[in-house]
Amino acid sequence: MKQELRSALKKFLNKSVVSLLCFSGLSAPALSILLVEYYDFSFFYGCAIGFLCFLVSFIIVMKRPDNEKKKINAIERDS
């Protein structure tokens, strides 16, 4: 049961990690605006976190086609 749940969660995260990172990158500055009255520099940290989320998602997207090409080439070599 746990193994099936882990594999399902892993498949879900592999498919939607970029969209989750983009959503968190958009929402981080908006949420940090709400925290300005508690901590003065929260907006700068929120923008930095949002930028890092977009940067990580960009890196994932740029690396993903290389992995897919390697899989296709390996399948073609085997057949």
Image: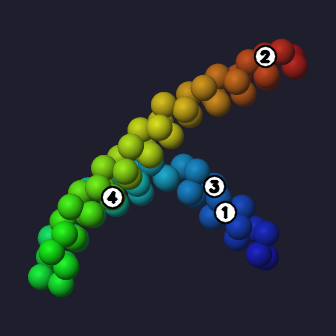
Q: Are marks 3 and 1 in contact (CB under 8 Å)?
A: yes
> Badge 4, how many Cα within 10 Å: few under 14, some, many 20+?
some
Q: Which residue is mark 4?
A: 49
Judging depth in this view, the residue of 21 and 32 nearest the camera is: 32
Horizontal arrangement in the rendering, residue 6 relative to residue 64 (left or right): right
Q: Nearer the viewer, residue 77 or 66?
A: 66
The residue that appears at 35% across and 46% down in the rendered structure is 54
The amino acid type, in three-letter code, at marker 1 is Ala
Q: Earlier in the sequence, mark 1 or mark 4?
A: 1
Write the residue at 75% across / 68% down. 4
**SS class, disc 4:** helix
Name the foreground residue: 34 vs 6. Answer: 34
Marks 3 and 1 sit apart, C-alpha to C-alpha, by 5 Å
Residue of label 2: 76
Label number found at residue 8? 1
| Res 76 → quadrant | top right
**Colour scheme of the picture:** rainbow
Q: Label 3, on which residue?
A: 11
Q: Residues within 10 Å of mark 3 (few under 14, many from 20)?
A: few
